[in-house]
Image (cartoon, grey):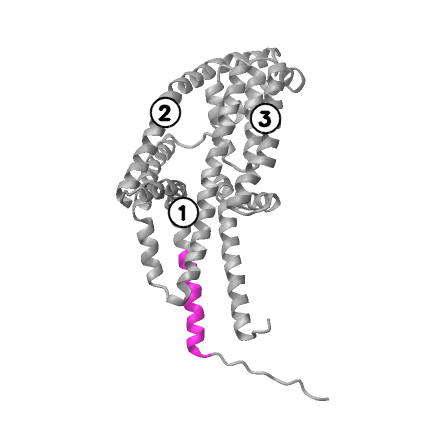
Amino acid sequence: MAQPEVRVVTLRSRTVLLLIGLTVLASVTLLLAYLAWQVLTWILIALFLAAALNPAVQFFERRGLSRAAAASLVFAMTLLALTGIGFLVIPPLLAQVSDFVDAVPDFVDDVTAGRGPLGFLQEEYKIVDRIREAIESQGAGGVLGLSLPVLDVVRSVVTAVVGVITIVFLTFFMLLEGPRAVDRFLELLPEDTRARYERVGGDIYRTVSGYVTGNLLISLIAAVLATIVLFAVGSKYAIALGLVVAIFDLIPLAGAAIATVIVGTIVFIETDWLRGVIVVGFFIAYQQFENHVLQPLVYGRTVELSPLAVLCAVLIGAQLAGILGALLAIPVAGSLLAIGREVLEYRRETASIRDPAV
């Protein structure tokens, strides 16, 4: 019987060391990314905001302004607009939130006594008694998930404030120095591949910019329409609930459904079942309009993803990084699509050069 041929694979020490070095480098990079995840999150948010504001900066550049002047003008206009919106929205928002907090004890009394729209929770399920038993055994903090020490809460608030300030400055400097930094990076590349990187970078920029701008516009439309409907049904918390809708609607596909549950429940408790049904019916109708008209119109032109691909990307992003992952999933998927298209085009070009008959 013939013995099987023995093949000996020889690896040069240089190759082994290179593989070990690349493995160590990748591991260190992932470790540093994990340790600096919060800062990287701020940088990503600032990058997306800069991509959304950059078309306005380019508009003023085409009108003769320098990059610094155009970026400063757009940044100042954005801050003034946000400040104006804050002065218009924050006072009634605080008043409505305060009124809602003051009304919570009355809602609790109604549930405890078995009255009102949610009285059945006590009559049929004894929900109040169960909550009391849980508080006695775990404490209020354990039931509400607020068992963190006060120092941790203060640290979280300070971190959030520092994060907002950092994102603001990062956004401005990205607007100011972004194109120059991109040009310097491209100058380091070989001339034969520079055009390809420019093309991919342009596709990624259009994807991110279009997504951020479109998503903010969709959320604004949802908030305005929701606030109008809430005012129409006589809700005392129309502005506060409209802000809730704007925040959750930033999450593609699932955000509108979450807002529907929250807002519908509050209106149902606050007013009566008929007005609650009207509000829920509006949200269901608007969600269909947003999912089938607005989002395909925005994402189809800017990100070039099908609704199924959008849903899969959002689910994967949410699983990997929570709400932030869901927000970043679509532009990341669109960017990967742009890179994949360029890789396939490069392979076709390479194949045609090797075999002109292809």
Which SS does the magenta portion mostly show?
helix
First-in-chain label (2 vs 3): 2
User: Which residue is located at x 51 percent, y 32 percent?
Assistant: 249
User: Which residue position holds label 3?
Assistant: 283
User: Which residue is located at x 46 percent, y 29 percent?
Assistant: 146
Characterize the local packing of mark 2: few (<14), some (14-19) or many (20 or more) Cα atoms within 10 angstroms.
few
**Labels 3 and 1 touching (C-beta < 8 A):** no
Task: Report the amino acid beneath label 2.
Answer: Gly
**Labels 2 and 3 touching (C-beta < 8 A):** no
Q: Position of residue 261 (x, y in %)?
A: 58, 26
Q: Residue furthest right?
A: 1
Is residue 31 toward the left or the right of residue 221 in the image? Answer: left
Characterize the local packing of mark 3: few (<14), some (14-19) or many (20 or more) Cα atoms within 10 angstroms.
many
First-in-chain label (1 vs 2): 1
Q: Image height check: is 255 above or below 350?
A: above
User: Which residue position holds label 1?
Assistant: 37
Quarter of the image where one finds residue 4: bottom right
Q: Is residue 217 in the magenta section?
A: no
Callout 3: SS: helix
Evaluate whether residue 30 shows in this view: yes
Callout 1: SS: helix
First-in-chain label (3 vs 1): 1
Cα distance in 3D space between marks 1 and 2? 30 Å
Picture quarter with the N terminus: bottom right
User: Which residue position holds label 2?
Assistant: 86
Picture quarter with the C terminus: bottom right
Of residues 66 and 289, which is closer to you in this image? 66
Q: Position of residue 17 (x, y in %)?
A: 42, 72
Task: Report the amino acid beneath label 3.
Answer: Phe
Characterize the local packing of mark 1: few (<14), some (14-19) or many (20 or more) Cα atoms within 10 angstroms.
few
Is residue 173 toward the left or the right of residue 276 in the image? Answer: left
**Labels 1 and 2 touching (C-beta < 8 A):** no
